[in-house]
Image (cartoon, rainbow, N blue to C red):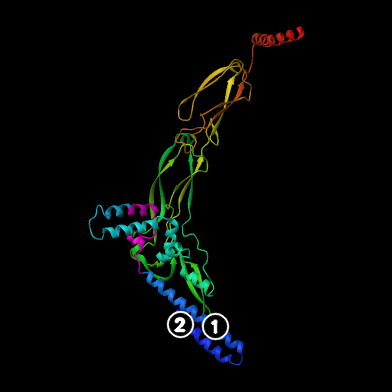
Amino acid sequence: MAVMHAQQGAATRSRRRRGGSGGTSATKSAVCGSWVGRLQWSCFLALAGLVVLVSGQKDLYEVLGLGRGASSSEIKKAYRQLSLKYHPDKNPSEDAATRFAEVASAYEVLSDEEKRDTYDRFGEEGLKRTEQGGSADPFGDMFSHFGFGGGRRQREESRTPNVEIPLRVSLRQLYEGDTFDTVYVRQAMCVGAGQCEKKCKDCQGPGIAVRMHQLGPGFVQQVQIRDDNCIARGKCWKKNCSACPKGPTQQEEVILTAEVQKGMRDRDTIVFEEVADEMIGHRAGHLVFIIETLVHPDFTRRNDDLHMDMEIPLVEALSGFEVNFKHLDGHTVKVKKQGITSPGDVMQLKKEGMPRRGSNGKTFGSLYIRFSIAFPKALSAEQVTTLRGVLLEGEDDKADATQEL
C-alpha cells in the first residue's frame, strides 16, 4: 500500500514539473516537493521494515505462559512458579539460566502497569523508545515529523468500568474488624480465547485500530479508532471460533474474602483489582466495595469519636452517680460523676471512641456522653415539703450571710 502511494505521488509530481516549465518559481516548488515526498516515503518504508523486524521478538506473555488478559495476581503467580523452576541453583540444564533471565525480564515489564500498557500497544520497541525518552509509537512520530497529518489521538483507558457495590456493616464490625466471604458473578474471557486470535495488521493494541486515509496524491492520514475486536498489536478476535462458541466471554463465579479493617469509615473502600467484567481487547476493571455504616441505637460516630445520650434520675443529678454499660465489643465502661449534673452537660471519656484506622486497635478516639435529667412525674405533699425545706435551707443560709455583711 505504501509503495502504491509513493508511485502515485511520483506521477503527480512529474506532471507538475512538465506543466510548470514556464515559470521559475513553479519549477523550484515542484523540485522541492519531489525531494520532500521522497524523504517522507523513505522514512515510512524504513520504519515499516523496523516494525516488521521487531515483531519477531518473543512475546512476554508467552514467556510466562499466560494470555494477554491475565490479571496482576496471575502474572505474579506464574513468575513465582517459573522462577523457581528455572533458577540456576535448582535447575542444572543448559538453558535454565537463559529461561530464568527471560522470565525475570517479562515479569519486570508485565508487573508494572505503565510498562505493560506500553508493551501491549507498541511491543518491546515501544519500551525501548520510552526508556530513551522518545515516543513509544514510531508511526505517530513519523507522521507528526514528516507532514502526513492525522497524528495520534489520545488513547482511551483500555479497562472495563470499575464496579462499585455498597457494603453495609454495623458499627460493631467497624469497631472490632471483620471478614466476610462473597460470591461475585462476572463476565470472564473464554478459557480457549487464545485459540481464537488471528492476525490483524490494523490493530495497534487492545481496543485500538489504525486506519490510513488518502488525503491526496502522495499524502495519507493516520486515524486511530476504537475497535473492540483488537486484542493486541497485530492481533484480533476470530469470529465464530469453535474454541469459544458462545463468544469471547462467559459467566464466572469469583469467591472473594473481604476484610473490614478496624476503624474504617463511611465511603472507605475495599478494592479487588481486575475482578470486574472482562472484555475482549480490555483489561478487567476493579471491584470496589464502599463502606456504609448501619444506624446504631445507642452510638453516633463522628470521625473517630463516639457520641451517646444518657438519662439519669433527678436524685442522681443532684447527688452524683455511678453507671456501667457495655461497649460495642462487650467490655464494661464505668461512668462516675460526683456533684450536680445539669441537663446538657457533656462528659468526655478518652480512648473509648472508635479505633483509629491503621493503628491496629492501639489508639482510639473519645466517647462523649451528653446527659439529660429524668424528672419525677408527680410528688406527694410530704415530698414537696421535704424537698422545699432541703432546697430552701441552702437559700436561707445564703440570705443570712448576706444580711450579716
Compared to residue 381, the image places residue 292 above or below, namely: below
Q: Position of residue 20 (x, y in %)?
A: 59, 90
Q: Report if residue 73 lies within the magenta region.
A: yes
Q: Where is residue 402 in the image (x, y as percent from the top left)?
A: 75, 10
Please give the name of the residue rendered at 26% of the width and 60% of the height, measured from the top-left corner. 95
Residue type marked 1 = Gly
Horizontal side of residue 44 vs 197, given as left or right: right
Q: Pointer 2 and pointer 1: residues touching (CB < 8 Å)?
A: no
Please give the name of the residue rendered at 44% of the width and 65% of the height, measured from the top-left corner. 129
* Front-most of residues 401 and 299: 401
User: Which numbered disc, 2 or 1, marks the residue closer to the eye?
Assistant: 1
Q: Residue at label 2?
A: 4
The C terminus lies in which quarter of the figure?
A: top right
Which region is colored magenta?
A: 56-79
Horizontal side of residue 149 vs 194, given as left or right: right
Q: Residue at label 1?
A: 33
Numbered tag placed on residue 65 in the rendering? none
The N terminus lies in which quarter of the figure?
A: bottom left
Q: Does dot 1 land on a helix, a strand or a loop?
A: helix
Q: Where is residue 124 in the image (x, y as percent from the top left)?
A: 40, 64
Q: Does dot 2 land on a helix, a strand or a loop?
A: helix
Q: Where is residue 196 in the image (x, y as percent from the top left)?
A: 36, 65
Horizontal side of residue 340 vs 163, given as left or right: right
Compared to residue 85, the image places residue 334 above or below, namely: above
* Front-most of residues 312 and 204: 204
> Is any part of residue 232 visible from this angle?
no
Please give the name of the residue rendered at 47% of the width and 34% of the height, measured from the top-left corner. 175
* Front-most of residues 134 and 205: 134
Horizontal side of residue 293 vs 25, given as left or right: left
